[in-house]
Every structure is written in C-alpha cells, then in structure tokens.
Image (cartoon, rainbow, N blue to C red):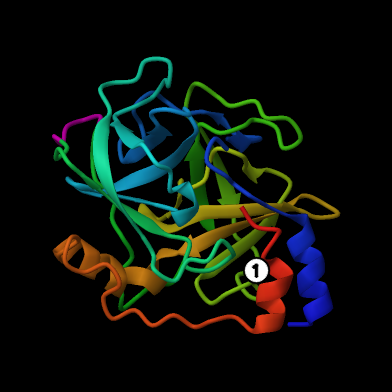
Amino acid sequence: MNICWFITILLLLHSCNPGDCIVGGHVSVPHSRPYLVYIQDSRTKSACCGVLVREDIVMTTANCKMSHLKVYLGVSDTTLLPTGIEVDSFPHPCFENKPGNDIMLLKLKTRATLNKTVTIIDLPNPWNDKILKDCLVMGWGSTKYDHYSPSTVLRELKVTLKDLTNCFEPDVICNEDPFGPSQGDSGGPLICGGIAMGIVSFHMKKTEGYLTGYTRVSQHLQWINEIMSAPHRIERGTTTCTPVTKQVEKAVSEFFY
C-alpha cells in the first residue's frame, strides 16, 4: 500500500468511539435482535454495542474499553434499561488504537438467563468463513454522520458488501456505502446469514459516502476460544502480534480513536 495514500486516509479516519447509530436505517421490531447488547460506562454514560456469544461472554471492539463498563441485556429502548451486569474486560493483546485486532471479550460476573429477549449469536465456522454479501448492521448510535444524535431505540440497516479486498489489515472487512454504522455503533455486529461475521470498528468519510471497517471475527477464533476457556489464566494465549512498520506507526499515532 502506498504510504502517502495510507497517511491521507488516516487523517480522514474516524473511529466509532464509545458514545458513538445507524445512518439511513429503520427502527427494529422490539426485541427482534435478542443477541445484541448495550454497553455503557456507568460513570461517563459513554456507550457502544456488543453481542452475546455465550451466557457469560459478550464480544465487542477493543476501542470500547472503558473504566466502569456494565452490559445490559434484552434492551430495545435505552431509556428503559434493566439492571446492568458488571464485567471483566479482555481486549485483544495486539490492539494498538489503529485498524486491526480491534476486538474484546467481556466476561459477565453474572451469567445471562436465556429467554425470548436474550439469546446467543453464532460465530463463524473456522473451516468455512465465506461472507455473504447481504448483511445486517444495527445499533443505538447516531442517526447522522455530521451531528451526534444517538437513537434511544434500536435501529438496523441492510448492507451489501461490495469489495472485501484492499483493506487496512487481513482481519478488517471494509465496505463503502452512503449509509451505515456511525458514532455509537462501535462493537455492533455485522450479521451475515445469521452469523456474527464482523463487528463495527471504524468509519471514515470519503468523496462519496462513507467507508466502514469491520473486524473479521473468523481471524480471531483461536484467541476467542482461549479466552472463553480460561479468561483469568490466559489473556494473550498463543497470539503473535505482527508490528506495523515504524513509518506507518509514526503516521497513525495521532489519528486513531
């Protein structure tokens, strides 16, 4: 990738920071996405999204890491939140506030009770991670790109993935569209064929429309399984971090998240 072109993109890049909604979407049927989780810092009230992947595990993005996180299950309207659940946070050890490795698991201190409004979403199959082009994104984030206006009710949008190549890192899925996730949708899922194939990592403004970056879940299944097996004994697991070049690292250090 040409370094000048790369740096130009970095200057335009906007993460879906905590406190970051779906632009151009529609209101979801209440409790129709029971795997979706509302995540909030209990002190600052900054918020993001996640998905329940086991009764005691929520998957979200590492850029959602905050000091006093609580998760809320079975939420449709954020003005009517249930009792929050405290968590232990396990961000990916290779995440460096730039595209790539933007994933985190939250271990609930109280296991979820599964019912019609709280369910688990499936993760990709490690032997077949082909991504369908017609997918669904959702969240409570801003309904406008240029003005922070979070939604109190869950919104969703069908997206068509166009070109999965030429993205920042091997574990990043990029898609350009005039509508999509915005500020507040960080950590929300990219659902393709009923499977959580990606999670919202960042978005950036382009000449026409916006580019959304999703963390490709299938690239992190080994790490996910290790954390789910023994979260308090294994944080890094067998993960090997591949550092970016010093030139790129210097260029991106001030422009992410």
Identify the secondary structure beneath mark 1.
Answer: loop
- Across and down, in percent, residue 186 comes to 51, 46
Residue shown at 82%/74% (left/top)?
5
Image quadrant in which you'd find residue 234: bottom left
- How many numbered badges does the structure rendering display? 1
Image quadrant in which you'd find residue 94: bottom left
Q: Main secondary structure of the magenta part?
A: loop
How many other residues sit within 10 Å of disc 1, few (<14), some (14-19) or many (≥20)? few
Residue shown at 56%/65% (left/top)?
173
Residue 119 in view here: yes
In the picture provided, is 69 more to the left or to the right than 144? left
Instruction: Tell me which amino acid carries mark 1.
Output: Asp
- Across and down, in percent, residue 155 comes to 52, 31
In the picture provided, is 185 more to the left or to the right than 93? right
Residue shown at 37%/15% (left/top)?
80
Closer to us: 215 or 65: 65
- Across and down, in percent, residue 24 comes to 66, 35
Above/below status of 94 relative to 17: below
In the picture provided, is 154 more to the left or to the right than 70? right
Residue 133 in view here: no
Residues in magenta?
113-117
Query: Does the magenta portion include 115?
Result: yes
Q: Quadrant of the N terminus?
A: bottom right
Above/below status of 36 relative to 202: above
Above/below status of 225 relative to 257: below
Q: According to the image, label 1 marks what residue?
A: 163
In the picture provided, is 140 more to the left or to the right than 142? left
- Across and down, in percent, residue 143 comes to 64, 30
Residue shown at 50%/32% (left/top)?
46
Closer to us: 216 or 57: 57
Query: Does the magenta portion include 79?
Result: no
